[in-house]
């Protein structure tokens, strides 16, 4: 798959904001994933004084990347200590992001996209491994992550991970998402069809339908 840069429009209808109260200051209607497509809208901040000043991109950038998986151990939201490499290489296609539960900007939006993507998968969801890794592991304990996962309707195929600060940083660095301060993190989604295959990296906000399209393209050529 070649590198693609796709422009997005500069704003989202304010009518879509606030429909999902708990996810404020960013919120979507249930069908917002349909409308945030490669040719439509990007979510902007509602509160200019919001504490989290994350960078919002005006476009999504797709590229194929090769990453060396870090040999780190993380703690899954069910409390089990696991090898990240073994989790990612369990044979299923992987879709992954990096989050933290107290985030009020990028993370609610990306997790809402993941939730809608999970819904779009339908009966295919059992064949996919959805992975969300905390970049604030000191605060994001397994019980906190489990509650957070429930908030977004995460099914058994979608796991959240925490661990030591060193392990979290190593994972972030391995996938080139480490920004030094969690307040500076940017929206990045990573997809891989199978172990040993390159990763599709999406910088920016892609819609659930776009992710589904990219996922099906990947597995068609694995």
Image (cartoon, helix red, strand yellow):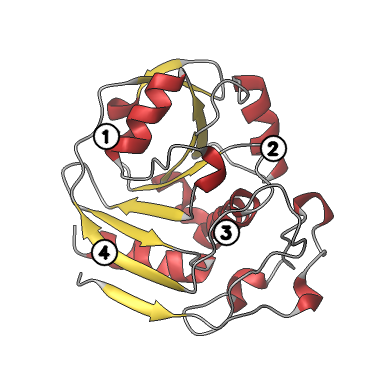
Residue annotated with mark 1: 89
Is residue 74 in sight in this rendering? no
Q: Confirm or deny contact between disc 3 and disc 1 (CB under 8 A).
A: no
Disc 2 versus disc 4: distance between alpha carbons? 31 Å
Q: Confirm or deny contact between disc 1 and disc 2 (CB under 8 A).
A: no
Q: Quadrant of residue 177?
A: top left
User: x%, y% of residue 168?
Assistant: 42, 27
Q: If you read the primary sequence from the N terminus, does the residue marked by circle 2 or circle 4 appear first? A: 4
Residue annotated with mark 2: 150
In the figure, 18 relative to 91: above or below? Answer: below
**Circle 1 Cα neighbour tier, 10 Å, few/some/many (<14 / 14–19 / ≥20):** some
Is residue 44 in sight in this rendering? yes
Q: If you read the primary sequence from the N terminus, does the residue marked by circle 1 or circle 2 appear first? A: 1
User: Dot 1: what SS?
Assistant: loop
Viewer-proximal residue among 6 and 190: 6
The quarter in which the N terminus is drawn is bottom left
Q: How many marks?
A: 4
Viewer-proximal residue among 51 and 108: 51
Q: Nearer the viewer, mark 3 or mark 4?
A: 4
Q: If you read the primary sequence from the N terminus, does the residue marked by circle 4 or circle 1 appear first? A: 4
Disc 3 versus disc 1: distance between alpha carbons? 23 Å
User: x%, y% of residue 37?
Assistant: 52, 77
Disc 2 versus disc 3: distance between alpha carbons? 15 Å
In the figure, 172 relative to 21: above or below? Answer: above
**Residue at the front extreme, as displayed:** 49
User: Dot 4: what SS?
Assistant: strand
Residue in the image at 44% along x and 65% along y: 212
Residue annotated with mark 3: 113
User: x%, y% of residue 27?
Assistant: 73, 61
């Amino acid at each position: 798959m070649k590198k693609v840069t796709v422009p997005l429009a500069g704003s989202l209808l304010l009518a879509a904001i606030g429909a999902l109260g708990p996810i404020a200051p960013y919120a979507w209607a249930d069908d917002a994933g349909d409308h945030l497509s490669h040719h439509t809208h990007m979510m902007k901040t509602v509160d200019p004084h919001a504490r989290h000043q994350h960078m919002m991109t005006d476009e999504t950038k797709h590229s194929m990347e090769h990453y060396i998986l870090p040999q780190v151990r993380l703690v899954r939201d069910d409390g089990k200590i696991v090898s990240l490499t073994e989790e990612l290489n369990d044979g299923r296609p992987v879709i992954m992001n990096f989050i933290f539960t107290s985030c009020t900007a990028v993370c609610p939006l990306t997790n809402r996209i993941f939730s809608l993507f999970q819904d779009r998968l339908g009966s295919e969801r059992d064949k996919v491994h959805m992975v969300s890794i905390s970049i604030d592991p000191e605060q994001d304990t397994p019980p906190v992550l489990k509650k957070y996962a429930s908030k977004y309707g995460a099914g058994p195929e979608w796991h959240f991970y925490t661990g030591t600060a060193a392990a979290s940083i190593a994972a972030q660095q391995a996938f080139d998402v480490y920004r030094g301060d969690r307040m500076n993190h940017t929206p990045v989604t990573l997809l891989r069809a199978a172990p040993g295959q390159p990763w599709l990296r999406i910088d920016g906000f892609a819609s659930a339908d776009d992710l589904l399209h990219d996922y099906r393209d990947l597995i068609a050529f694995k």
